[in-house]
């Protein structure tokens, strides 16, 4: 492997906390079970923590996320 190839493969600096938070932001939505007014539902959040929406069950939440070309990820 050449030196130029190594430069491409190894970053010149470590990722900052902000870089890590932004990583995947465009592609991922987090789904988490929550209780609202004594009823279980599913909250959908962007990678930055912004509330995107709510769904009555997990399957509906995942379907909604996928309809918007995002990858759903469960949060426990």
Image (cartoon, rainbow, N blue to C red):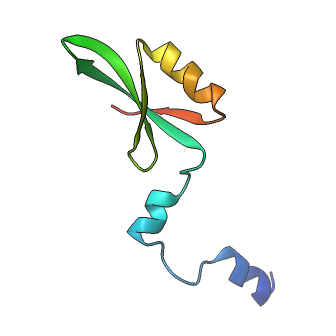
In this picture, is 66 found above or below 18? above
Q: Is residue 61 left or right of residue 42?
A: right
Residue 43: % across, % down: 37, 27
Q: Residue at x 63, y 32 (%)?
A: 68
Residue at figure coordinates x 61%, y 36% from the top left: 70
Q: Position of residue 75 (x, y in %)?
A: 38, 33
- Quarter of the figure with residue 35: top left
Decide: is 37 above or below 20.
above
29, 73: nearer the viewer:
29
Q: In the shown orientation, is residue 12 left or right of residue 37?
A: right
Quarter residue 52 falls in: top left
Q: Position of residue 12 (x, y in %)?
A: 58, 84
Which quarter of the rendered picture does the N terminus lie within?
bottom right
The one nearer the camera, 14 or 44, is 44
Q: Which residue sits furthest bottom?
A: 3
* Quadrant occupied by the C terminus: top left
Question: In the displayed structure, would residue 63 be above or below residue 24?
Answer: above
Seen at 50% across and 37% down, the residue is 29
């Amino acid at each position: 492997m050449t030196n130029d190839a190594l430069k491409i493969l190894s970053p010149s600096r470590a990722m900052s906390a902000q870089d890590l938070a932004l990583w995947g932001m465009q592609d991922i939505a987090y789904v988490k079970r929550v209780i609202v007014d004594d009823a279980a539902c599913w909250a959908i959040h962007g990678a930055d923590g912004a509330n995107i929406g709510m769904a009555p069950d997990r399957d509906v939440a995942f379907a909604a996320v996928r309809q918007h070309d995002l990858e759903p990820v469960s949060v426990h």
